[in-house]
Amino acid sequence: MRRIRFLVIKEFKQIFRSRAMLPIIFVMPILQLLILANAATFEIKNLNLIIVDKDHSQFSRDISSKFRGSPYFKILNRTFTNTEAEDQMKLRNVDIYLEIPVNFEKQLIRESSTKIQIVVNAIDGSKGSLAGFYASNIIQDYSKDLSIKYGIRANLISPNTDMKQIDVTYSNWFNPNLDYKTFMVPGLLVLLVSLISVFLSSMNIVREKEIGTIESINVTPIRKYQFILGKLIPIWILGMFELIFGLVIALLIYKIPLLGSPWVLISFAALYLIASLGMGLFISTITDTQQQAMFFTWFFMILFIMLGGLFTSIENMPKWAQTLTYFNPIRYFIEVVRMVMLKGSGFYEVRLHFGVMAFMAIVINTLAVMRYRKTA
Amino acid sequence: MDEKWIVEVEGMTKKFGDFTAVDSISFRVKKGEIFGFLGANGAGKTTAIKILCGLSRPTSGKVTVDGLNVYTQAEKIKEKIGYMSQKFSLYDDLNIEENIRLFGGIYGLSNKEIKEKSEILINKLGLQDVRKELLKSLPLGWKQKLAFSVAIIHDPSIVFLDEPTGGVDPITRRQFWEMIYEASSKGVTIFVTTHYMDEAEYCSRISMMVDGRIAAMGKPSELKKELGVRNMDEFFVKLARSK
């Protein structure tokens, strides 16, 4: 035990003394959290829109002003022919255009039914479908206005003439305003803590290999587990500090709710960090230079992040990819963070996650200790 | 086991794939002597020394250090030996006191012992003014002297020095050898490799390795007589070329 204490003290001294390390550990993650929380959003605003108004009626102007009032669209132009809209679409200056046909108003009044065409630039698939979705929502909303103002029961979107409109109302549980920050910030926090801990642990031991100090350690009667604990405990403490620090930022700056108990979150993070540090450690036992360790770490982290359920939801992945995510520690951490923060889940609801994470921590650390050799 | 010998090596071989770095060598080191382990670059000295320190496993042969078997008791051996390599290997980003404390702690010295030993060591090396300086700011000669002192901080029965004076100026080399003699007079066995043939003369006994084998072994004076050479330089050249 005493030996481990000496090693932990040494490690802390080295970290706090290194001028490059401190900003990496403390400043960069916070900057990333501040920047990404505002930038990494799925919400799309200011979609460039052209309205091709072939009708020039009161109704067509009403629709235009409805779009103008929406934060999602920016009306670039109103034209009378499709040509310009199509040209702009080809030049990629416009995301969506709306064609209001001739006699739009007349048909509405006479037949209570007509069609508006929405043309969407779908090069970016998810942006395209969102644009279409927003536009049809606005038009639907307009048809409601019509029935209130003029008693016209109109169906503008779907071609079927059944007048009984079904209103779809959404209610978003656990994140009632569909606030993307609420959704993203807890996940980002997980990523940052993961990156820092895995990188620090994988590079740290390899660095001693490169400098040659590991030989001085290996020639002493130090036990493998003592050396490894001496390495992991300081990084574990840093990781926990980082997580709690980030959590405070999330709560104070972004006002992310924390419905569940912070202790469930913190104890899961403690377990998660043991697993991710074990991973870093394992990488450092199979590599000889910091460069190699860096590439290995990147390879795994990219996979884990992309399959972690933060940027793409796991339900939308193909079956085989979904299966892969079961081996991804980040997935579990993101789920737990969201469940505890947004849903208020207690320990009982996330007990499975705890079980899986404990299993992962044991397996990867055992592998790492076995793989670490004091002899060449 | 004979009490007289601290290192006993019989038919020790180390192979890396097809390459045989150490080819069935046998030798013994007496307790308390200064044993010089000579050889040209790549002759297999470092490989042999790493095996004796438990950093590397021999492919075959019988090897004991202080009566302990390197195959099964490597970790026990590590408690009894000190090791200092040609590559400086204390922590550059810790200061002098911190390095002493770290290795003292690893070897299980009590806080009081660490304190006392640090004082003695720092005073002896004349490092009072730089005790809080990071090692990276110190000249190599000082660092090597410190590394040697740290290698024997736990009073080992034998210390292995792998080219400890490489790249060090003549005055410091002299001081370094004074330190070796002092440790030796306290009963620490010294096992040292070197390229400086004047240093070979300081040893009680030497062995000369050529291409993974031991080509000659004995007291420097006897070896010179045997081969009819005037000094160790000639001795070295004659043996290293004779292959």
Image (cartoon, rainbow, N blue to C red):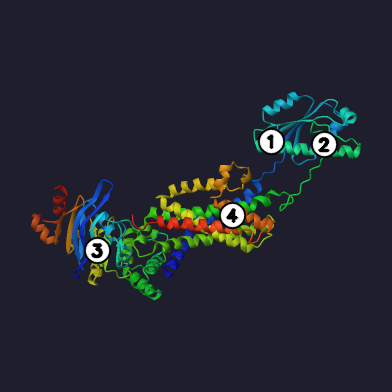
Q: Amino acid under label 2?
A: Ser
Rendered location of residue A47, percent (x, y) = 72, 37
**In contact (CB < 8 Å): disc 3 and disc 2:** no
Q: Amino acid under label 4?
A: Phe
Q: Residue at x 58, y 51 (%)?
A: A331
What secondary structure is marked by label 2? helix
Q: Which residue is mark 2?
A: A65
Q: Do the residues indicated by labels 4 and 2 lie within the same chain of the protein?
A: yes
Q: Which residue is mark 4?
A: A333
What secondary structure is marked by label 4? helix
Front residue (pair A372, B166): A372
Rendered location of residue A297, percent (x, y) = 48, 49
Which of the two discs, 4 and 2, sits closer to the camera? 4
Q: Residue at x 61, y 60 (%)?
A: A265
Label 4, label 2: how many angstroms apart (C-alpha)?
A: 45 Å
Label 1 resides on the chain identified as A
- The answer to whether residue A283 is left or right of residue A29 is left
Label 1, label 4: how many angstroms apart (C-alpha)?
A: 31 Å
